[in-house]
Image (cartoon, rainbow, N blue to C red):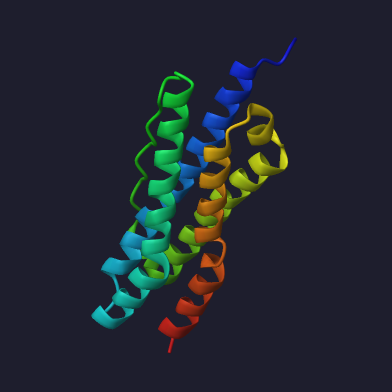
Amino acid sequence: MPYTTADARQQLLDSVVEAGEALGAALASLTEAYELLDENAAERLEEQLFRPVQLAYARARRAQSEFAARYELPGRSFEPAVRGAPSHGVKGFLEAAVQAIGEADQALATLQDSMLPIEVGDPELRADLEQVRTLIGPLSHRAHELVRNFGR
């Protein structure tokens, strides 16, 4: 079965949506963790994790939307993330966020390694994917540092 440019574009779009949904799940977990923290700890969480994930999520949504519009593909919305149970605690929510961020990064890394963005010839999307990965790259380490400091 021949592989068409339209198929490649749709696969690209699906991968970006997958990463965006994972980032949405990370945001939901970070929001839950935020609600359980005191004011100082919540501010650190917001500054070090929530804002970068929020920016990456917005960038992924915009990249997906603009890419779909450029090639007249049907746009897709990201599915809303499900809120977690409060019994998970801050550590559980942060671990869930780290896992979701890792899933997003893996989806984007796989996409970039596939050379699909180059084959489709979309420099704007390639730049957006790189920016999302730059935003989320250091977050796993930051989350582990926050968990360690919250335990003190």
Vertical order, 99 against 125 (above or below): below
Vertical order, 134 against 7 (above or below): below
Single out the residue that lies furthest toward the top. Answer: 1
Q: Nearer the viewer, residue 52 or 145?
A: 52
Q: Quadrant of the N terminus?
A: top right
Q: Where is residue 147 drawn, in percent x and y? A: 47, 77
Q: Where is residue 27 drawn, in percent x and y? A: 38, 55
Q: Nearer the viewer, residue 122 or 151?
A: 122
- Residue that appears at 57% across and 50% down: 130
Q: Quadrant of the C terminus?
A: bottom left
Q: Where is residue 67 drawn, in percent x and y? A: 47, 30
Determine whether, in the image, residue 80 is placed left or right of residue 132: left
- Residue that appears at 35% across and 66% down: 33
- Residue that appears at 52% across and 53% down: 131
Single out the residue that lies furthest toward the right. Answer: 1
- Report which quarter residue 138 is drawn in: bottom right
Say if residue 24 shows up in the picture: no
